[in-house]
Amino acid sequence: MYAYGYAPPPPRRGGPSLILIGGLALLLVLVVGVGAMFAFNIGPFAKTAPTAIARPTEPPATATPRVTPTPSPKPSSAASVAPSGSAPTAAPTKTASAVPSGDVAAQLLSHVPTTFAETCVTTPGAAPILALATCTVDDGAIEVTYFQYDGQDSMFQAYEGFRLVSQIEPESGDCQDPASWPAENGYNIGGQPAGRWLCTEALGQTTIYWTDDRLEILSQATHTTSDYARLVQFWIEESGPNL
């Protein structure tokens, strides 16, 4: 029972609690933040920049090596008759004669003097060389090689190559006189121009190269111990090639 003149407090009405209000505020903040990150492409919504892929660089073009032609080998052959004078210095102009059919190596060997032909070894050649024969004299002290060419022009070009490599001027001396070495000149057989010859020395060896216009044979004779006198004697008296 209540005392007279006292009224009880009115009943409380239900309302949102502070915890609920705080949770809603937090949720609102999260929604706004996520929306902002999505709108501005930041955070987890940021766009990944594409990674550049390296492309192999094409290698620079390689210059094609320029091939420099080298003079073809020039065999030297000694005349079977002592030179009787200088021949004209102009290159031979005679039309090349046809090489007889058959065994070219055997035909070449037939022009080698019989005194040492049995020491020779013949080998097939490659154009313009048809065949070659390598021989020895004086128990190997002199080495001789005969090259059979397919024509006089190709033979003379090979000889010119040897002359140029040896740096010898045309008609520059007499190979019969060792004091004039190195030298180059023409030679005669029986009073007629037969070819050209040059003489030189290198690495302790003396060498004579010579052409035979009658046979299209270029020859080379080398004395391994630089005996000038013996090499010249061999060239004049024994070397060939013979008709």
Image (cartoon, rainbow, N blue to C red):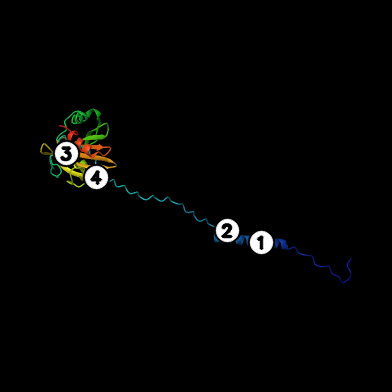
Residue holding disc 3? 152
The amino acid on which the numbered mark 2 sits, given as a three-letter code, is Gly
Mark number displayed over residue 26:
1
Residue at position x 63%, y 62% from top?
29
Q: Secondary structure at mark 1?
A: helix
Q: Quadrant of residue 213?
A: top left
Task: Name which of mark 2 and mark 4 comes first in the sequence.
Answer: 2
Q: Secondary structure at mark 4?
A: helix
Q: Are marks 1 and 2 in contact (CB under 8 Å)?
A: no
Q: Secondary structure at mark 2?
A: helix
The crowd level at tag 4 (other Cα within 10 Å; few <14, some 14-19, many 20+) is some
Q: Are marks 3 and 4 in contact (CB under 8 Å)?
A: no
Real-space Cα distance between discs 3 and 4?
21 Å
The crowd level at tag 2 (other Cα within 10 Å; few <14, some 14-19, many 20+) is few
How far across and down, in percent of the image, does residue 57 sit? Answer: 41, 51
Which mark is nearer the camera, 2 or 4? Answer: 4
Task: Name which of mark 1 and mark 2 comes first in the sequence.
Answer: 1
Q: Is residue 32 left or right of residue 167?
A: right
Task: Name which of mark 4 and mark 1 comes first in the sequence.
Answer: 1
The amino acid on which the numbered mark 3 sits, given as a three-letter code, is Gln
Residue holding disc 2? 43
Q: Are marks 3 and 2 in contact (CB under 8 Å)?
A: no
Which mark is nearer the camera, 1 or 2? Answer: 2
Mark number displayed over residue 166:
4
How far across and down, in percent of the image, does residue 209 sit? Answer: 21, 39
